[in-house]
Amino acid sequence: MAVHVLQRKAPTRLPRWIPVSAAWIGSGSLFAWSGWKLAFTLYLMLARPADASLPEDLAAAALLHAAALAAGATLARALARGAGQGRRAGPDTPRVQV
């Protein structure tokens, strides 16, 4: 939702920093959480502890964490692209000189 707000051409009532902050927090948490969980899940898949009862299917967990990792990276890329464009002044936008 935050990336959608940033890429819209129409002005919004929100200050720009609110959706930017929400998108950075979302992409960072998706990427970081899934990154370490994927590494841990892959370790468990390779180590195959004999005496441990695992609460989840490791293949499904690895697929889920890989998808979340990709979603976080995609969200960060879209955010960087959208935030980098900023609100450029058009021909009908009044310019303020300082």
Image (cartoon, rainbow, N blue to C red):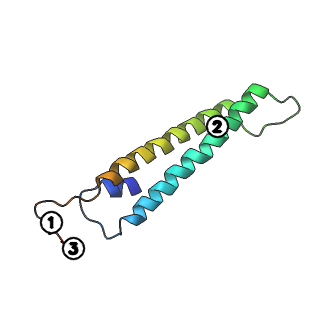
Point out residue 4 in the picture as x, y percentages from the top left corner: 35, 54
- The kind of residue on which mark 3 rests is Val
Residue designated by label 3: 98
Mark nearer the N terminus (3 vs 1): 1
Mark 1 nearby-residue class (10 Å; few <14, some 14–19, many ≥20): few
In-front residue for pair 39/54: 39
The N terminus sits in image quarter: bottom left
Distance Cα–Cα, label 3 vs label 1: 16 Å
Q: Is residue 74 left or right of residue 63?
A: left
x 31%, y 70%: residue: 13
Q: Is residue 46 left or right of residue 63?
A: right
Q: Is residue 95 left or right of residue 49?
A: left
Residue designated by label 1: 93
Mark 1 or 2: in front is 1
Point out residue 76 in the picture as x, y percentages from the top left corner: 45, 47
Q: Are marks 2 and 3 in contact (CB under 8 Å)?
A: no
Circle 3: element type: loop
- The kind of residue on which mark 2 rests is Leu
Point out residue 38 in the picture as x, y percentages from the top left corner: 64, 37
Distance Cα–Cα, label 2 vs label 3: 50 Å
In the picture, the disc for residue 38 is: 2
